[in-house]
Image: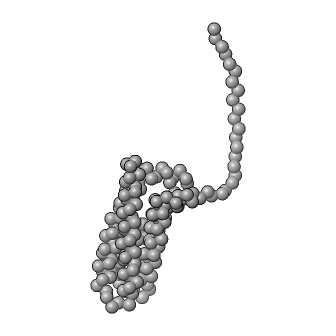
Amino acid sequence: MTMSQSVTIRTHTVTNSSTAVIINTGYLKTLGGLLKLFQLALGVVCVAIIANYFGPYRQYSNAAELFFLLMTTSFLIGTFILLLSCLTSPSTSTIIAKTIYELLYHSIAFGLYLAASLTFIIHVSNMKGYAHYDTLMAGAICGLVNAALYLISTIVALRTYRGI
């Protein structure tokens, strides 16, 4: 005995023309979000200090100064884009944390930030008595603190990637 049934399928198309941008503010309450926010803030301080040091009256630049400027600017931009993508897309913040991208990004940022900050702090320590010594030393120390934040982010990324 065979029974047959009749099934009716109805579909509805709903369009939404809203241009509202949803911000995932809950991401800033996570450890990863807070670390990125602090990295961004310290990156702005580092870039502002070293960029202010370069002026129209400077005749030359030292390799340590340029390396510090390049690293701080590069990771400021990279961290800003990473934070912005996690804030504007709730799915991005959960997916990207489980990939190897964050682990690689933060570990490379840690290594290069540490190298640039140590190189710059050694360079600045040889400039005692210079008018901008205190400001440049503060920038170098902010760079070391930011390197520590990237190290913590690397550890968090490693645990998230491994599923620990």
Please provide percent x and percent y for residue 37.
49, 66
Quadrant assignment, res 109: bottom left
Q: What quarter of the picture does the N terminus occupy?
A: top right
> How many labels were placed on the picture?
0
Q: Is residue 158 visible?
A: yes
Q: According to the image, what is the colour scheme of the structure?
A: one colour
Please provide percent x and percent y for residue 156.
40, 57
Which is nearer the eye, 67 or 27? 27
Query: Is 103 placed above or below 8 here?
Result: below
**Which residue shows up at 35% across the image and 84% down it?**
60
Query: Is 43 placed above or below 157 here?
Result: below
Q: Is residue 39 left or right of residue 151?
A: right
**Which residue shows up at 31% across the image and 70% down it?**
115
Q: Is residue 22 left or right of residue 63?
A: right
Please provide percent x and percent y for residue 13.
70, 40
**Which residue shows up at 66% across the image and 13% down it?**
3
Q: Is residue 103 left or right of residue 22?
A: left
Quadrant assignment, res 152: bottom left
Query: Is 79 placed above or below 62 here?
Result: above
**Which residue shows up at 49% across the image and 58% down it?**
30
Which is nearer the eye, 64 or 135? 135
Which is nearer the eye, 67 or 93? 93
Please provide percent x and percent y for residue 75.
42, 66
Q: Is residue 69 visible?
A: no
Q: Residue furthest top?
A: 1
